[in-house]
Image (tube, helix red, strand yellow):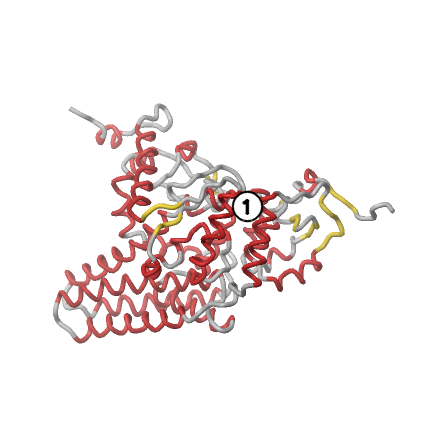
Amino acid sequence: MADSKRYISKTELETHKKPDDLWISIQGKIYDVTQWSHHHPGGPLPLLNLAGQDATDAFIAYHPGIAWQYLDNFFTGYYLEGYLVSDISKDYRKLAVEFSKMGLFDKKGHGTCILLTIIALLFFTCVYGVLCCDKTWVHLCCAGLMGFLWIQSGWIGHDSGHYTVMSDKNLNRLAQLLTGNCLAGISMGWWKWTHNAHHIACNSLDFDPDLQHMPFFTVSSKFFNSITSAFYGRKLNFDSLTRLLVSYQHWTFYPVMCVARINLFAQSIILLLSKRKVPNKAQEIFGILVFWTWYPLLVSFLPNWYERVMFVVVSFAVTGIQHVQFCLNHFSSSVYVGPPNGNDWFEKQTDGTLNILCSSWMDWFYGGLQFQVEHHLFPRLPRCHLRTISPFVKELCKKHNLAYNCASFWKANAMTIETLKSAALQARVLTNAVPKNLVWEAVNTHG
């Protein structure tokens, strides 16, 4: 009997990758998600980045089983001609099914409630120390606690952006606003916008915003060609100022990380003041206003300007530990140029990430980032299970001759600095890449 299915080729599918004409393939069936992209909970960007190709593995990674029932609403009636599944993808999908059967995606434990309680205690301890004690060392300790509080609230914000950490979605949203916007001054809307793009296009120099830190840092000499950011929609100019800063980036890395929080504040405010559509924008703005009310007010109760400045500096510097952790997982890993490819999902996610070796009693310090490979492959999985699934992921990598990248915290720092140093030295020896100016000549004058 003749096959009555209608097929389209991969070449034809690739023509449907524009905002007003957006098709994807999932398990060989073609879906038109053009209109849905405007309502997609993860935003339109992940769909655009994977448009015109197979996106099965990414769909499995980011969606619970219940999402499959809605796909038929977007089915075009076409099937992908010559659709094949690689051995790696087959094993990856089997692993996702097994974890689902084990209930790992639903068992969240009580870690979030415990951590929220700790954060509340830390906050009130800081407030009490500032308002009720007159010792300078107490105020500085409170500043350190504030930085530690921001780190821990960041982990909850990260978790709640990937899966529901509370008993329902409304409480989950409340946890996001409290820990992200109100306590830390960072828009969860901004975080989800950038973080979703990062996960989909892990370590793509032009699609992953987490690698686009010019003029301060570049992890690859490919940035010297002033590549265009698909995320920001503009050219990342490698000009003379950028060259100067990048040439010493391996020395400035840790100092910049101490004040990196300023960038998150700025990016949050810029997004919320822009015309870009942000879900629950009023809530986002309200949460940011709450932060910029209580934090400056708390600092103002310190007895003098010296202590006020030191309080801000210490709290920011302590939080800088978390910013370093973010960089360790990706800066020294493999990078590429171009959009993500749904056909090598597993390979790209493992190749672009680095695990941090640590004992189980230190898991609180890393917030799940120590199992970055597992987290990128199964982003919906609660972090309390990442250590459990690690052996399965490691075995799968071994089976398919893929590297399972991991290093100690200190080794990862050394690898990151080495990556930055390599790019810095290449920037110094560039000839005619950018016009030299008097500042550059003065800094590099010897003798």
Task: Residue 191: give x, y in percent of width and height.
Answer: 44, 57
Where in the figure is residue 337, as x and y percent of width and height?
A: 49, 37
The residue most toward the right is: 1
Instruction: Give the residue pinned by disc 1.
Output: 345
Relative placement, left or right, of 402 versus 218 is right
Q: Callout 1: 10 Å neighbours few (<14), some, many (20+)?
A: many
Classify residue 306 by image quadrant.
bottom left
Q: Is residue 297 above or below residue 19?
A: below
Residue drawn at x 30%, y 29% is: 428
Number of numbered discs on residues: 1
Q: Quadrant of residue 272?
A: bottom left
Give the camera-side residue of 99 and 222.
99
334 up-or-down from 20: above or below: above
Q: Position of residue 398 (x, y in %)?
A: 49, 43
Say what secondary structure mark 1 lies in. Answer: helix
Residue type for callout 1: Trp
Seen in the image, is 237 located left or right of residue 106?
left
Residue at the spot 62% in from the left edge and 62% down from the top edge: 67
Q: Which quadrant of the rendered structure holds the C terminus?
A: top left
The residue shown at (87%, 47%) is 1
Residue 56 placed where, x, y %? Answer: 62, 50
Most foreground residue, 68 or 232: 68
Q: Is residue 177 or residue 220 the one in the foreground?
A: 220
